[in-house]
Image (cartoon, rainbow, N blue to C red):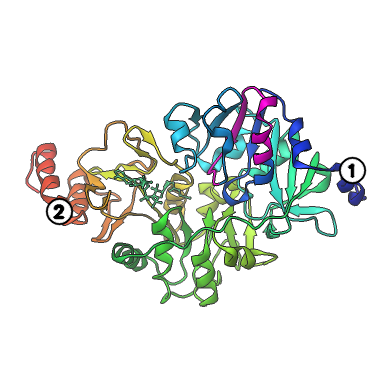
Amino acid sequence: MCLNWEEDYKKRLTTAKEAVQQIKSEDRVVVGLGVGEASCLVEAMAENYRAYQNVEVVQMLALGKTAYVNPGMEPHFYKNSLFVSGKTRKTIRDGHGDFTPCYFSRIPYLWEKDLPVDVALVQVSPPDAHGYCSLGVSVDYTKAAAEQAKMLIAQVNAHMPRTLGDSFIHVSQMDYIVEHNQALLSLPAPQIGDVEKAIGENCAYLVKDGDCLQLGIGAIPDAVLMFLNERKDLGIHTEMFSDGVVDLVHAGVVNNSKKNFNPGKMIATFLMGSQKLYDFVNDNPMVSMHPVSYTNNPYIAGQNDNLVSINSCVQIDLLGQVSSETVGMTQISAVGGQVDFVRAAAISRGGRSIIAMPSTAKGGQVSKIVPILDEGAVVTTNRYDVEYIVTEYGIANLRNRTNRERARMLIDIAHPDFREVLKVAFKERFHADY
Ligand code: COA
């Protein structure tokens, strides 16, 4: 490491246009996650498409412009998605890219052998007095990619919060530096209707004072937070968190005081929300960001006593098989950290895992509790791992229950419009009355 990092910094400064010219055809380019994406670099790469053939772009949760997946880009870019977002669903569905199933906790290990990184495009905060830049809101797999890439191109953004923890890379590790200030993407607050309110209240019933929370992605986990105002001394060890957690800190509900593992600290690997969240995490010693191989490793997260994981799903069958990432044949999402944390909660002393969902989808036209999963749907959380299922109609604890007990409990929390159909399916499957 060079002590005279300011000289290094100046020497490596360039423009986005020039930096992306270093990318070569057939390179594998890893892009940071979610609002951490170095969008000025990704956009410059897409604009320079004529210079490339078959550049593999690997990313989880694309939220930026993703022009590199536009029609006509196929000979230039190939998308390898580690999570399918609204931005990339069509690309994957239409076969213009592909999807690699991998537990989130294991993604940093992909870079070691199976998917070695040619170029990492990352976004960081400006360097501190010692030349260290924080990866801010996206430490996850991005830190390992930055450390292992043959070439590291960093966007330095004054708006990127300087988060603390194991979140820093040094200027000397960077090959090219592009200064570009832009506000981080701000995500809208979740819409809370009567259904979300009832689900939130049911989940809150399962959360006790002093618990340590993991919160998944989607509207439901965020909604649950709004119903925890009466709780005391909650802690956070999660994959991601959003504005709802900031409100609970300000309300004195989350203080991390009862955590037996990393006491006093909120542990996370990526962040998505509004400017309120980004201001809160900036230089805040209460927030400790770590690579996902740490936060989501079930044996590490499971060291937190009373760990409660709250995630959501697309569909569940009467045996308790949870599909969280496909609608029939179509990949719409991915496992993310769901199974990592379901297993961590099972390891944790006093832990509980919750999969919470509205009882119906498509404006009430389809039940999310079904006799058998849709043809082509994949099982994300299997029936050996599943524990609590929550809908607006109640709570079912499936752990260590027989097939018939599970099915009965699930029918009891299904939407009333679908219960009769489910009871008929119960009779056919189990040759017994409901
Ligand atoms: N049948 C048909 N379509 C369904 C459906 C069902 N049973 N359930 C959901 N859908 C559709 C919705 O209509 C919606 O379609 P649209 O985008 O065309 O409107 C889409 O699937 C997403 O559903 P929605 O309820 O809006 O999603 P959400 O934002 O609440 O997220 C998950 C729910 C399950 C997709 C999300 O929690 C997830 O990705 N989970 C897996 C990863 C995970 O848990 N990670 C945890 C750690 S971050």
**291 left or right, relative to 374:** right
Q: Which residue is mark 2?
A: 417
**326 left or right, relative to 185:** left
Q: Position of residue 156 (x, y in %)?
A: 75, 51
Q: Position of residue 48 (x, y in %)?
A: 69, 32
**Residue stretch in magenta:** 42-63
Label 1–label 2 contact, CB within 8 A = no
Q: Which residue is mark 1?
A: 11
Give, as a three-letter code, the residue at label 1.
Answer: Lys
Estimate how packed mark 2 is, as few (under 14), some (14 to 19) or many (20 or more) residues with alpha carbons within 10 Å. Answer: few
Give, as a three-letter code, the residue at label 2.
Answer: Asp
Q: Position of residue 60 (x, y in %)?
A: 54, 41
Q: Is residue 272 above or below residue 114?
A: below
Which element carries disc 1, helix, strand or loop?
Answer: helix
Q: Nearer the viewer, residue 57 or 351?
A: 57
46 in the magenta segment? yes
